[in-house]
Amino acid sequence: MPAYPHLLAPRDLGFTTLPNRIIMGSMHTGLEERPDGFERMATFYAERARGAVGLIVTGGIAPNPEGRIAPGAAVLSRAQPEPRHGLITRAVRDAGGRILMQVLHAGRYAPHAAAVAPSALKAPINAFTPRALSAAQVERTLDEYAECAVLAREHGYDGVEIMGSEGYLITQFLSRRTNHRDDCWGGSFENRMRFALETVRRTRAACGRDFIIMFRASLLDLVEDGSTFAEIVALAQALEDAGANIINSGIGWHEARIPTIAHMVPRGAFTWATQRLKAHVRVPLVASNRINMPAQAEAVLAAGAADLVSMARPFLADAGFVAKTMAGRPQDINTCIACNQGCLDRIFNGEVATCLVNPRACRETELDYRAAARPRRIAIVGGGPAGLACAEIAALRGHAVTLFEAGERLGGQFLLAQAVPGKADYGETVRYFEQRLAGLGVDLRVGRRAIADDLIGVGYDAVVLASGVNPRLPELPGIDHPKVLSYADVLLARRTAGARVAIIGAGGVGFDVAEYLSHAGDAAAGSAAEREAFLSAWGIDRSADSPGGLAGAGPRMRATRELWLLQRSAGRPGAGLNRTTGWAVRLALQLKGVQMWNGVRYERIDDDGLHVQVAGEPRLLAVDNVVVCAGQEPARDLHPALAAAGMTVHLIGGARDAARLDAERAIREAVLLAVSL
Ligand code: NAP
Ligand code: SF4
């Protein structure tokens, strides 16, 4: 019996057979708009095709300029034929893969003056108000969808995915929230779904029977006045009749105030939305959102929740995901940790996406891990993310690597992060590196604090100091009081905090600690109880008749402690959190009643608690504990001795710059150094 009998089974679509049930879902990479983007995308997708994924879907391509997801974003039309798509399709085919092009019209989400929509209703996440499409413009837009698909076929794509979820144009026609029309495209649900069905009918008519049409339908809108389950079933059945070969699951509009893919979303939290549709349709259904490891994907299919699974970010993290699954080596997979830092945060900043745990993603043509011309002996001090990533790539390139880690385990700051509710997957990164370094023969000296004598005069050609950071201890009377805890004490459960806690410092670590200390329940990561707790906390209703899947009572969260999250500066606490996840982190803590104060002056800590001044007024926070999350200082004590001995020393990660410490930068620096050694 193979390890993943459902996941690795082929799927016959009638005119073509997918080799397995794993789809690499659509992700905008930012390469679509770069001058050299098509060459780079060809390499990027071909590498994933060689990794044996069953079907790849490109990032969204607009069928006309109005539908662009950003000013200057990619379009495929007769007016803008873009012949370089052939580079992608040839590369994928040569690598033995199949690829669909996603057709995406942003509708009222288009952040530019040309935006159009069923009705002139501004989206809460867009500064631009769209123009309402006239009936003639609706017809023209539909023809442009079909024309775009025809061009995709001419360029060699195996089919298209029509983006009909996440609140984009097709969803805007479907929903009474955004469709206030009174012609044949609005009013009754039959009228509102006409646009979606016509995209499929016209594409099928124009492209023929042997062309894959996957439709991404919104199975859960998570916005007020969203679709009911009856409407979702009616749409799915009509899509099937219209000629769709596969229906993919979309979860949540972009304007929804409920996280759908961020780290706090439990693995597989939304597969029930696909499962409940399963009994009502014949076409293959695809489950998506927070599926990131093969055993979990296998369980989704084995439970009959879906016919295929879609993963997007996991293919940034590891191009070889499927090949490793087929080889029965899931422990070798570099797992996506749903941080969004390397991928979505970058896209929203107008940059090319990459991946925190795999900086080579979307940089395949630049970052070459070829064998080093002259193998060297390299010592790396520190087994946190930076040291581990540097050791991996240096060893991969043929260097003899020795890694010293003072702690009892590899992992550094990720050992703390994995304790934060929703961040258990950070432990997968540690598991990946442990496997990988052992496989590459790195000489691991764990539980051994390196001293200068370990490094000087013993034949190393270079030393990499990846020794991380030391927590900053503010100069404050009473900072040595027994009620003061370090964040490591808290996250590593070395000390238990009381019922009332003040947190000094409202940066990333302060927010993590607040989440840890306020979290209710002890459901295990990955358990059904964890998924249920998430749905209930965020007010998601699984009953069939609630529009948009929202519970009337809204989110229900409670904190297990009384918490104050404090900062000295005047800005909004949490303003520096990551762009695409920070809002949900802040919102959850607000819903739990965590007090967030800015402009705080710390006076002293004593038996009564933490004495502060806020707006010139003295205040006493009568807390049981004060947790210090006041940033970091570089830990690089070895540097002077190594430099004095004339050794080649490289500083990376927090040891180089603790002020802007973040794992994405640390790993990227580590890999860039490793390719240059
Ligand atoms: P940080 O983000 O720089 O925040 C440090 C906090 O401490 C600030 O609120 C700062 O605010 C305060 N502070 C600084 N010096 C202080 C002093 N002398 N006395 C009292 N308060 C002081 O650092 P961090 O929270 O340690 O996070 C480090 C890095 O880890 C971040 O850059 C982040 O990228 C990453 N991280 C991110 C996340 C996330 O986004 N979810 C989670 C964990 C870690 P005031 O100066 O205004 O008081
Ligand atoms: Fe996943 Fe984070 Fe990598 Fe994005 S950056 S693919 S969320 S691990």
Image (tube, rainbow, N blue to C red):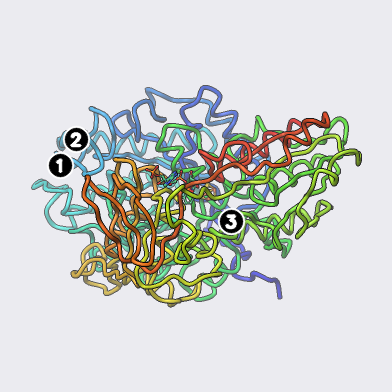
If you read the primary sequence from the N terminus, does the residue marked by circle 3 or circle 1 appear first?
Answer: 1
Q: Name the one closer to the observer, 247 or 267.
A: 267
Local crowd size for mark 2, using a 10 Å CA cut-off: few (<14), some (14–19), many (≥20): many
Mark 2 touching mark 1, by CB under 8 A? Answer: yes
Q: How many numbered circles are shown?
A: 3
Task: Locate residue 33, reporting x and y percent.
Answer: 46, 28
If you read the primary sequence from the N terminus, does the residue marked by circle 2 or circle 1 appear first?
Answer: 1
Local crowd size for mark 3, using a 10 Å CA cut-off: few (<14), some (14–19), many (≥20): many
Q: Where is 26 relative to 333, above or below? A: above
Q: Determine which quarter of the picture holds residue 395.
A: top right
Task: Locate residue 569, reporting x and y percent.
Answer: 33, 41
Label 3, label 2: how many angstroms apart (C-alpha)? 44 Å
Instruction: Identify the disc placed on residue 414.
Output: 3
Label 3, label 1: how many angstroms apart (C-alpha)? 44 Å
Q: Name the one closer to the observer, 217 or 473.
A: 473
Mark 3 touching mark 2, by CB under 8 A? Answer: no
| Image-based side of 166 in relation to 353, left or right | left
Task: Locate residue 100, reporting x and y percent.
Answer: 50, 44
Looking at the rendered structure, the kind of residue marked 1 is Leu
Q: Is residue 314 visible?
A: yes
Secondary structure of residue under mark 2 = loop
